Image: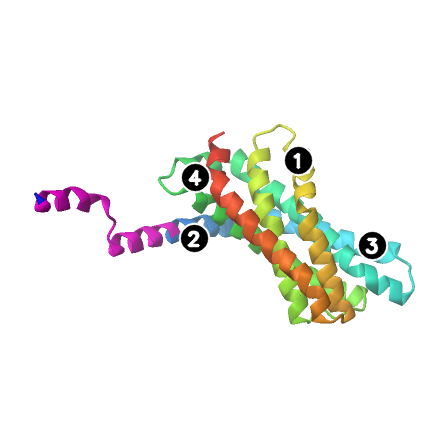
Amino acid sequence: MKKRAHQSVEPFVDSPPERTSSFRSYLRALWAIVWKDLAAELRSRELITAMLVFALLVILIFNFALELDPKTRSSVTSGVLWVTFAFAGTLGLNRSMAMEKDRGCLDGLLLTPIDRSAIYFGKMIGNLVFMMLVELIVLPLYSVLYNTSVLHPGLLLVIFMGSLGYIAVGTLLSTMAIQARTRDILLPILLFPLAIPVLIAAVKSSSGFLEGIPLNEIRPWLNLLLVYDVIFIAIAFMVFDYIVEE
């Protein structure tokens, strides 16, 4: 009797090798999605070019528009930086999901026998890579035009955390907006209100590091960035499956 009970329970218990194999399959699926996006962008260069041109245009316009004294100018440049990143990131999110929809790639991904969260994280990582590449090109020009040094580990950490939070929410919302006819207008309407906390925290943190404010005064904004990233990535992980089914 005990032997029969043991046999009836055993098939429902995953052994450690099976769990390891499942995790490796998950990572392979995630990497395949990321590589697909990177390879497609390397061939076309549509997304990076559009984001980069837009970001450089915004930086140049603000440079000539803000004719302020040096002290006031230095206090507002972090806002200029994040306005540029936010607008370029929104453009990239729209273009990324639009290409998936127009080419039928999104439907193909949903038909594959993989966890839906792997699709979300693959798209999120791909969008984050594109945004970080644009930021790496924009930062030196920003440093020259605004006479500001960006070679600060804290500032670079803030840029990464802020970009991660913005892309995490944007990838989820762009998946929702892609089904609408007015997707280009709908995504900013949905995204900007939810992204206000991460943008404010990123602006305050960046300004603190650029102005040399003590770390104790910057830490609350860094904590807000960290909490925002964790909460919204977790929310996206839980609800992405239901969003794509709709």
Counting residues from the N terminus, which is met first, the one under dot 4 or under dot 1? 4
Counting residues from the N terminus, which is met first, the one under dot 1 or under dot 2? 2
Q: In which quarter of the image is residue 80?
A: bottom right
Residue that carries the numbered disc 2 in the rendered image: 31
In-front residue for pair 218/83: 218
The quarter in which the N terminus is drawn is top left
Mark 4–mark 1 contact, CB under 8 Å?
Answer: no
| Residue 198, horizontal then vertical, whole percent | 67, 52
Which amino acid is tagged 2?
Trp
| Residue 34, horizontal then vertical, whole percent | 47, 51
Q: What element carries label 1?
A: helix
| Residue 136, horizontal then vertical, whole percent | 65, 62
Q: Give the range drawn in magenta.
A: 2-26
Q: How crowded is mark 2: few (under 14 residues within 10 Å), some or many (20 or more)?
A: some
Residue that carries the numbered disc 1 in the rendered image: 184
Residue that carries the numbered disc 3 in the rendered image: 62
Counting residues from the N terminus, which is met first, the one under dot 3 or under dot 4? 3
Q: Residues within 10 Å of mark 3 (few under 14, many from 20)?
A: some
Which amino acid is tagged 3?
Phe
Q: What element carries label 2?
A: helix
Q: What element carries label 3?
A: helix
